[in-house]
Image: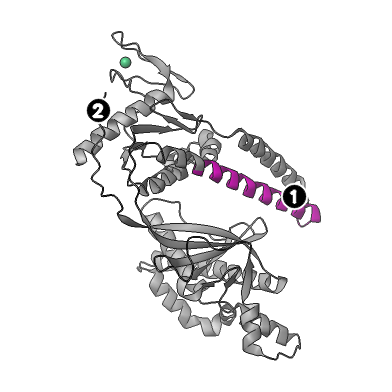
Amino acid sequence: MAMAPPATTLKTGKIIEIIKAHKIRLHPTPEQEAYLRRACGTRRFIYNWGLAEWQRQYQAGEQPSALALKKQFNGLRGVEFPWTYDVTKCVVEGAFDDVGKAFSNFFAKRTEYSQFKKKGKSQESFYLANDHLTVGDHWVQVPVLGDFIVKQREAKGETITKRAQLKRRLGKINLAEKLRFTDKTDKTSKIMGATIRCEAGWWFLSVQVQVQVPQTPLEGPPVGIDLGFMRLATLSDDTRFENQKPLRHLLAQVRYLNQQLARRQKGSKNREKTKRKLARLQYRIRCLRDDLLHKVAHQITERYGFIGLEDLNVRGMFQNRQHALSASDAALGRLAHLIETKAQAHGTPVQRVGRFFPSTKRCHRCHHLREIAEDERVYVCFNPACGWVGDRDLNAALNILEEALRLASVAV
Ligand SMILES: [Zn+2]
């Protein structure tokens, strides 16, 4: 089993481009918030329009495309949907991009058939293209925002002086912190775009920045990783990362609040209160989970020079109802993705092992195969000549390491 890791042929100091995202809390004024809500609503309307039109054309035997739909929409816009001009045209662009993505994902069988977005049910957001976006020290300039507020004030009978100046001032939303990864003097990084979204009643700006970083090659032993429902990650050297306990506790609270919500009268104040509580709790859980995944991915990618990972069929996991909670809990697909992106910074090779590879059924020592039930935590090899006994996930991780090294040496 003691195979040498494949030699990496990386030159030191190679510059690579990676996309980093920075999510910043926004502090909009009530007037600005009205615009953000309007933009999200417009985006939802256009997305649903595009989806319905796509379905209609597809059923009529035509071949719809996101681009053609956008043209069709823009043709109708002035007459039928003039109110969509109240917000930036980025909203229209972004909505049709998303319709296009939803259908290409569906046709590639990556996702379920796209659902219509319902007010209050779907995540509220809209996209801003990089050429319509200026980020300053503690503000972001949102297109058409200043214009929108000035018009609203005029409609209320206010007289506006110094119009252009006022528009500029009102169009800037306060940021809770300074944007990382880039500034005006930095020629090596650029803003790719941003999304504004509402989560749990709070507003956020997510900026995607492309940065150039020197790769820092890393010497380290090879490792195989088993990602799991019970234990988050088990490494082939028997390092173990447990699922976070507080998360389980918070998930119990989510269940409790959901029950409470079901008992509240529709449209009542208390129902709204419970809803808000639930949204904030879920937001907290998302943050905690993401934090844990980042830390685990960081620790793994700082320590090893070659990484073997299982190719997860996340969709398959969610279809298995028994696993639905713990799978979302552990967010295994996201962890695998984080490991891959962080490994990139070191040029560390990540080898995926096919999902039909019997990593849990095979004995890593003698390759004997056996069935093993979901709840059996200990692997016992039934081959009398071997008889290895040990942790189930450790056995899987050792199998994954061996297979990953084999695949990597074949590929060279
Ligand atoms: Zn064995």
* Left or right of residue 231: residue 251: right
Q: Which residue is mark 2?
A: 3
Q: Toward the viewer: 104 or 179?
A: 179
Question: Is 384 colored magenta in this rendering?
Answer: no
* Left or right of residue 262: residue 146: left
- Sequence-wise, the earlier of marks 2 and 1 is 2
Callouts 2 and 1 close, C-beta under 8 Å: no
Q: Which residue is mark 1?
A: 274
Q: Is residue 323 above or below residue 344?
A: above
Question: Is 290 colored magenta in this rendering?
Answer: yes
Magenta highlight range: 266-294
User: How many residues crowd around disc 2 within 10 Å: few (fewer than 14), some, or many (20 or more)?
Assistant: few
Q: Which quarter is ligand 1 in?
A: top left
| Local secondary structure at mark 1 | helix
Where is residue 140 shown, x and y percent of the image?
A: 58, 71
In the rendered picture of this protein, how many numbered marks are placed on residues? 2
Where is residue 85 shown, x and y percent of the image?
A: 56, 81
* Disc 2 to disc 1, C-alpha distance: 57 Å
Q: Toward the viewer: 167 or 360?
A: 167
* Left or right of residue 207: residue 303: left
The answer to whether mark 2 is within 8 Å of ligand 1 is no
Q: Extreme right residue here?
A: 269
Residue at the image point whose x is 45% and y is 51% from the top: 112
The prevailing secondary structure element of the residues shown in magenta is: helix
Q: Toward the viewer: 399 or 156?
A: 399
Residue 162's disc is none
Residue at the image point whose x is 58% and y is 60% from the top: 24
What type is the residue that disc 2 sits on? Met
Where is residue 47 shown, x and y percent of the image?
A: 51, 67
Where is residue 268 shown, x and y percent of the image?
A: 79, 56
What type is the residue that disc 1 sits on? Thr
Task: Report the quarter where the N terminus lies.
Answer: top left
